[in-house]
Amino acid sequence: MSGPFISKIDTLRPAFGFDDISLAPGTDTIDPSDVDLTQEFCGIPLAEPIIASAMDAVVSPTTAGVLRGLGSLAFINLEGLWFRYEDPAAQYATIISATADKVQTTFADLYAAPVRPELIARRIAEMRAAGAPVAIAATPQAVGKYADALIGADVDLLLIQSQVSSARHIASGYAPLELSEFVKRAGMPVAIGNTTNAEAAYALMEQGAAAVFVGVGPGNACTTREVLGIGVPQVTAVSDVAAARDAFFAATGRYVPVVADGGIRKGGEIAKALAVGADAVMIGSPLARGSEAPGGGFNWGMAAPSPTLPRGTRINVGTVGSMKQILHGPSHVTDGSENLAGAVRQSAAALGVQNVRGFRNVEVIYAPAAATEGKSWQRGR
């Protein structure tokens, strides 16, 4: 047989991350004080488009209240330490003090303790007392197991979150969670994540997703891309899913927010995520640097406790100041990692953007040299 032969390499689709693009100024600028970053997210008002990831090193019932007071929203992990131990202070101390060669074993041991259903009501009450909406994240397996306890509780928003979410899950050893049926009987908004695929996102919206979270493996403490070899750079992933959201809205009239989850380090990257279609971003490691964060200057991926194939690790992010400083400043550094909301507001002003959705009208350009052009003195010679 003679050619032509078609190779997958011949049809590779380019995909872009935050470092590959830049936002191009247009004809208008506005005063930063005229920028409105507020929105309603699944029935919960946000002062800025920033949501805290359901990482044990970031979110406790107390920090959920702190972040709410700053205008943000925090998810707590149903399968985390707070739902396995009455007072997880000793477990946090063990993780923080573990040596690098022992930390994965430590994770596996500590997270082997079962989730205790009686702690669900207790943590919800603690979050309420702290002034936080009750936003809980859980895997589909956990939702299936604790569905009655969650539905009977006073939960404002549930995020069903897995490594890769799809509308059709095949399993021979157990009955998969039927998303559409659960959403109908949940009695609360149900967000679903994570995906990077437009068709999958559209199908999740058809099944009733109140929001769709985007990102497979971009988090600073996540190793999924290395361990499993899967993932799509966030700019492409968010843009694809945002296109599905727009198509779904045009077809049904129901608007489903899209959240860029993972890979965000600086304020400029939040602006880029909004420009390619995100309604909000979910961040973990930047907030783990806050003095209130229970991780004590460390962060670890949600899949780190896996006893057989961890897709996360413990990273030392340090402590730089309060969560207020990280979100609202004043910034003591020049790299954009503090005063995240202020950076987004200033970016919007320079781009002539008045609100979150207005970012979508900004020109996005392929510019991998934008971060390094002319910066030789900053980067050393």
Image (spheres, rainbow, N blue to C red):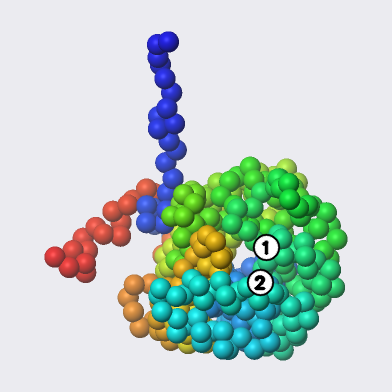
Q: Which residue does the image show at 72% across and 56% down from the upper left? A: 209
Please say whether residue 289 is visible from this viewpoint.
Answer: no
**Residue 160 against residue 324 in the figure, above or below:** above
Q: Residue furthest top?
A: 1
- Spatial CA distance of label 1 from label 2 is 8 Å
Counting from the top left corner in percent of width and height, residue 237 is at 52, 50
For the residue pair 324 and 62, the one nearer the viewer reads as 62
Q: Which mark is residue 139?
A: 1
Counting from the top left corner in percent of width and height, residue 30 is at 46, 67
Q: Earlier in the sequence, mark 1 or mark 2?
A: 2
Counting from the top left corner in percent of width and height, residue 97 is at 45, 84
* Quadrant of residue 377 within the rendered picture: bottom left
Q: Is residue 377 left or right of residue 74?
A: left
Counting from the top left corner in percent of width and height, residue 194 is at 60, 56
Q: Is residue 98 left or right of residue 306?
A: left
Residue to which mark 2 is pinned: 79
Q: Is residue 93 left or right of residue 111?
A: left
Q: Is residue 288 left or right of residue 61?
A: left
For the residue pair 78 and 175, the one nearer the viewer reads as 175
Q: Are marks 1 and 2 in contact (CB under 8 Å)?
A: yes
SS category of the residue bearing label 2: loop
For the residue pair 228 and 321, the one nearer the viewer reads as 228
The amino acid beneath tag 2 is: Glu
Q: Which residue does the image show at 54% across and 61% down from the upper left? A: 308
Within-10-Å neighbours for mark 2: few <14, some 14–19, many 20+: many
Number of callouts: 2
**Residue 240 against residue 128 in the figure, above or below:** above
Quadrant holding the C terminus: bottom left
Q: Which residue does the image show at 42% across and 10% down from the upper left? A: 1
Please say whether residue 38 is visible from this viewpoint.
Answer: yes
